[in-house]
Amino acid sequence: MIALSAIVAGWQSIARLIDPQPLTNLGWVLAAGLIGFAGNELVAIYRIRVGRRIGSAALVADGIHARTDGFTSLAVVLGVIGVWLGFPLADPIIGLVITAAIAVLLWGTARDIGRRLLDGVDPDLVDRAERSVRAVDGVQDVDDIRLRWTGHQLQVSASVLLSQETSMHEYENIRSRLDLAMRSDLPNVGEVLVAPRVRH
């Protein structure tokens, strides 16, 4: 749907550059564009925020789609202002600019959805998880850390290096602190698996 929005906006803009059409009822067009942009942006903010909170790439993509619809409405507003200022080609030129902006949003959305479909995780989440593990008292090093989305939950597994003097009771405390750190620093954490390794 995002790609279709870009294609339609680009096609309409090129058509109006080749064959300019007079705009009528500019006041109503301006009002509709402003209302459309504001409404779509509010919906986009809500969907993207909730999608990121619950780990739903599909809901984030839906929010970005709403944002592209808002940009289309904004293009109409800017085009109307340009026509009012005596520049009739403002409408199709701004339409082409918005088409480019939609294409950039499309690339980001396709990348995020593709990563999720291929069982990938945002590298920033992996870095955050590793920093969280290293910050836990008792952990000397991190041998390996892996993250995986299962539905809307992020599964975490970490192989950590502990001191040879670490007792079972101390290990249980370290594992508990690791679990709390993961849930505090990462979104929608499900299961946290910790594999200890002792330095000899």
Image (spheres, rainbow, N blue to C red):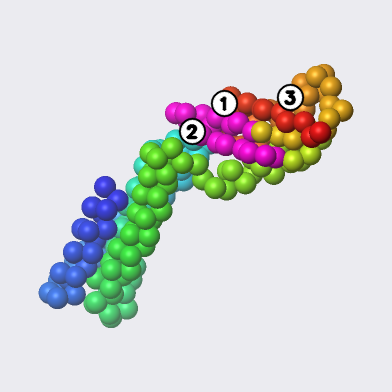
Mark 1 or mark 3, which has the lower sequence index? 3
> Which quadrant does the C terminus fall into?
top right
Q: Is residue 36 visible?
A: no
Q: Which element is circle 1 on?
A: strand
Residue span colored magenta: 142-158
Identify residue type, mark 3: Ser
In the displayed structure, 139 sits above or below 123; it is above
In the displayed structure, 33 sits above or below 155; it is below
Mark 2 or mark 3, which has the lower sequence index? 2
Residue at screen point 23% across, 52% down: 4
Label 2 sits on residue: 149
> Among all residues in the image, which is located at the extreme bottom?
86
Identify residue type, mark 2: Trp
Label 3 sits on residue: 176
In the displayed structure, 11 sits above or below 52; it is below
Report the front residue among 54 and 131. 131
Residue at screen point 66% across, 42% down: 130
Residue at screen point 64% across, 44% down: 128
Marks counted in the figure total 3
